[in-house]
Image (cartoon, rainbow, N blue to C red):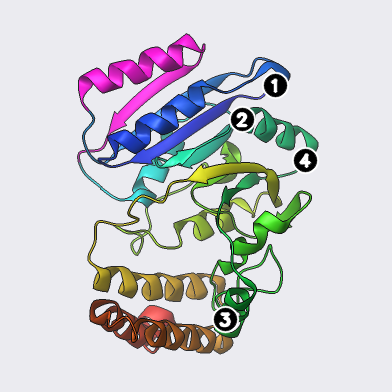
Amino acid sequence: MQGLSVVICTRNRVQDLTRCIHSIAAQNLETAGDPDIEVIIIDDGEIPEQVLGEYEALIHKQGHSFMYYRKNTDRGLWLSRVKAVQLASREIILFLDDDVEIPGHYLASLLQTYRDYPDCAGVGGVAIGMSNSFLGTLRCLASFQQSFSSGKLSLSGQAGSMYNWHKAKRTFKTEFQHGCNMSFRRAAIQHLAPVPWLKSYSVGEDILMSRIASQSGPLYINPELKLLHHESPASRDNLEDVAYTRVLNHVHLLKDKKSGPLGYLALLWTTQYLILRERPRKNEAAISGYRRGMKEIFNKQTAQ
């Protein structure tokens, strides 16, 4: 029997979180061998005491453990991930976004996948509705936002290949997972630590965590692990900062990977495309952010 820690990192999304908790409590685990499950909420905001009490009662009713941890300092998603690893006590850690809803078979299927691939360091799933049209795929390939291989990052380090994951018929190897539903063996990420450039809107944190975990074994995507991602607003930051961070963090990811000049040139092209995409929308804030980020590609202190 494998133990599972289900972790939800959240901030002031009580309605979304409630829906997610209810979907966890509604899991059919008859085929999973009565697994040892704990549910952990890492909170960067506030949840009313009455609501927390309802969560705890609901989770306990299913025979699972429940833990709530509110961060008063060190805000940000990556630091919530770090704290979750410190608190989790089961063999496998599943990270769910607070605005997802998992179908009744999800946890049983996840645990079965770990049994099917005992050498793996992690298993991820697919968000229903995340897909590209044929023309959209061509644009993503041309702008280096997507790789030709479903399990590979693009030349500029982008994760656009996940938009084709819904087409997969069987479990496949990958070098990255999608942060809304990714899981790892605790041993593979047990040394997770703060990262200076991953603050606030943590673009690329799922790529970095996947990279760390993959040092312990292969990662897989099981297309049967589908969930609904309701896509609540991704960030409370302003559009300029989000656009800037989107470029800056990929500069750091390329540096971490030691990708060389070709990766930075590809990121430059990707950023130029993103600017051109925003011009018809007259999204000056995002354009300004992308331009600021573009400067970091040439910043030797940042990129070298």
Asked if the residue at tag 3 contacts the one at tag 1, i.e. Cβ–Cβ closer than 8 Å, the answer is no
Task: Please name whichever residue, 16 or 176, is drawn nearer the observer in this view of the structure.
Answer: 16
Asked if the residue at tag 3 contacts the one at tag 4, i.e. Cβ–Cβ closer than 8 Å, the answer is no
Q: How many numbered discs, if any?
A: 4
Q: Amino acid at mark 3?
A: Arg
Task: Check residue 107 in the rendering and tell me which mark sits there, or answer none.
Answer: 2
In the depicted structure, whether residue 281 falls above or below residue 265: above
Q: How far apart, in angstroms, are the residues tagged by discs 3 and 2?
A: 35 Å
Q: Which residues are magenta?
A: 48-72
Task: Please name whichever residue, 131 or 159, is drawn nearer the observer in this view of the structure.
Answer: 131
Q: Earlier in the sequence, mark 1 or mark 2?
A: 1
Element assignment for label 4: loop
Q: Which residue is mark 1?
A: 32
Residue 52 colored magenta? yes
Asked if the residue at tag 2 contacts the one at tag 3, i.e. Cβ–Cβ closer than 8 Å, the answer is no
Percent across and percent down for residue 157 are 54, 73
Crowdedness near tag 3: few (<14), some (14–19) or many (≥20) residues, C-alpha within 10 Å: some
Q: Amino acid at mark 1?
A: Ala
Q: Which residue is mark 4?
A: 117
Asked if the residue at tag 2 contacts the one at tag 4, i.e. Cβ–Cβ closer than 8 Å, the answer is no
